[in-house]
Image (cartoon, grey):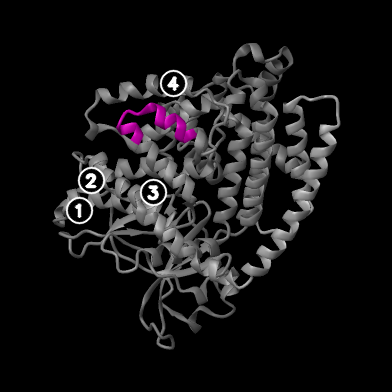
Amino acid sequence: MNIKNLRRLYHIIHTFLRYGVDEVIPNIRLTRSLHLGRKSLFWVKNQYPDKPFGVRLRLALQELGPVWIKLGQMLSTRRDLFDPELADQLALLQDSVEPFDGKLARQLIEQALGGKLETWFDDFDETALASASIAQVHTAKFNQNQPLASKEVVLKVIRPDIHQVIFDDLALMYRLASWIPKLSNDGKRLRAVEVVREYEKTLLDELDLRKEMANAVRLRNNFANSEMLYVPEMYQDFCHKNVIVMERIYGIPVANIDELKANGTDMKLLAERGVQVFFTQVFRDSFFHADMHPGNIFVNPNHPENPQYIGIDCGIVGTLNQNDKRYLAESFVAFFNRDYRRVALMHVESGWTPADTDIDAFEQAFREVCEPIFAKPLSEISFGHVLLNLFNVAREFNMEVQPQLVLLQKTLLYIEGLGRQVYPQLDLWQTAKPFLQDWLNEQVGVKAMFRQVQQRLPQFREHFAEFPETVFQALQQQKQINLRLSEINQSLQNQKNNSGLIRSLLLALIISGTFWQFEQIPLWLSSSLLLVSIGLVMVDLLFRSK
């Protein structure tokens, strides 16, 4: 560790001590030398003893700068690891920092585009429209030489030297995270190194604006011509790793409730559409915007009676595979039907928890945690907190961290919070239930079965011409297998050990080895041959029992 990193580490520790963040470390864990080092090197005590711990941690992260602010924002979503009060405080962190010089921004953009801005744009504003820890944005217009002449655009540019800042602070975060299990009894439960690793992936993804561009293009295509959601167009010819150019939009921030009402917005429909947009992204598209905090969501001011969301900043997205979606939907439906055994089975069948999980104990744990939730009316139950409770119970039964589900739960909490802020009477369950049930019917019903057969027909047709030859080869190989079975049977009959069980097991093992010698047999045929072989073993056992 060089002098620069040592100074930064000293500053980080000094800041945490000044805000009393070290109070979470039990004194018994601090050796005498550490106590002396704390007093001699830092000589600082908690300067804000009257403030709650969550507030002090938030202020410390705010002071340490943008990389730590974004860490706090990410930690606010890990409600499976932290108390709700602490998570709520961290959620207040704002990723807003002083902009860097506009002339430097111009220079960086020109380097990325390979020419002077005036070649493509007019009215470039060197005063940043907005500035965050990773990037800032400026406004301009396409000039008369461009097909979209006079079209207003936003240019987003990565901060200069941010890569080195991030890499240096990440290295220090890993070092601090490795200390936590040694300093706190709950250190292992917090899985600090895992949290930093998750944060690192998120940060590195945000440093490549081409990923944000690709995400925005996909989301825009998914909601093309939709009345529910609009995603600004990305001008892909002008997008690079550190610069992207997109359509400029005008909208009312979704958190500006008074302005939305003054504009005549149908608040009930707006809230319901927020839920519909989320579940459409998750269950129809398997691709969802995972950073839907109020700063990234606007409402189109036109046609307030038919309100439309506008989504920006697609740097963080989540995806679910087909099994994730099915098990998630069935778990939600089972929960609201209070079928806790089904909830437990879904977690095991999905592979989220080990196959040897005690289902009875698992069911009882879900019942004890979830049943009190139904003391509230259904309209007041939070989907996000339901999901959190399910995860917390499953974690006690060795559920591995599922990053895609963590993103989903975070996004669901955002959507719920926005929905109830927009329209406090929002009944989330009544809004979502028809969507979930319709989706499940499509996935597991008769229509779904015929659709799957239809999807596989081209593959069947492609291999149909090979069918006669494949069958002939398989039959020839089956003759060889039968011959070996006959030899094995004769050999075993001559042995003095007449244990039927041992004999059959040996037979099955040899048959399995025989199959390995015929790797060219297609999977669908080898399955049939395996069934035939199992049948032979069963027949053998039957004869021996007589």
**Crowd band around label 3 with a 10 angstrom C-alpha radius: few (<14), some (14–19), many (20+):** few
Question: Marks 2/4: CA distance?
Answer: 35 Å
Question: For numbered disc 1, what is the local secondary structure?
Answer: helix
Disc number lying in front (4 or 1): 4
**Crowd band around label 2 with a 10 angstrom C-alpha radius: few (<14), some (14–19), many (20+):** many
Image location of residue 475, percent across then percent down: 70, 59
Q: Earlier in the sequence, mark 2 or mark 4?
A: 4
Disc number lying in front (2 or 3): 3
**Residue at the location (32% across, 28% down)?**
338
Image location of residue 346, percent across then percent down: 45, 35
Residue pointed to by mark 1: 260
Residue pointed to by mark 3: 444
Kind of residue at disc 1: Leu
Image-based side of 478 in relation to 13, left or right:
right
Boundaries of the magenta span? 334-347
**Crowd band around label 1 with a 10 angstrom C-alpha radius: few (<14), some (14–19), many (20+):** many
Residue pointed to by mark 2: 422
Q: Earlier in the sequence, mark 3 or mark 1?
A: 1
Residue 284 lies, with reference to residue 187, above or below; the image says: below
Q: Earlier in the sequence, mark 4 or mark 3?
A: 4
Question: Marks 2/1: CA distance?
Answer: 9 Å
Image quarter where the C terminus lies is top right
**Residue at the location (48% across, 42% down)?**
405
Residue pointed to by mark 4: 365
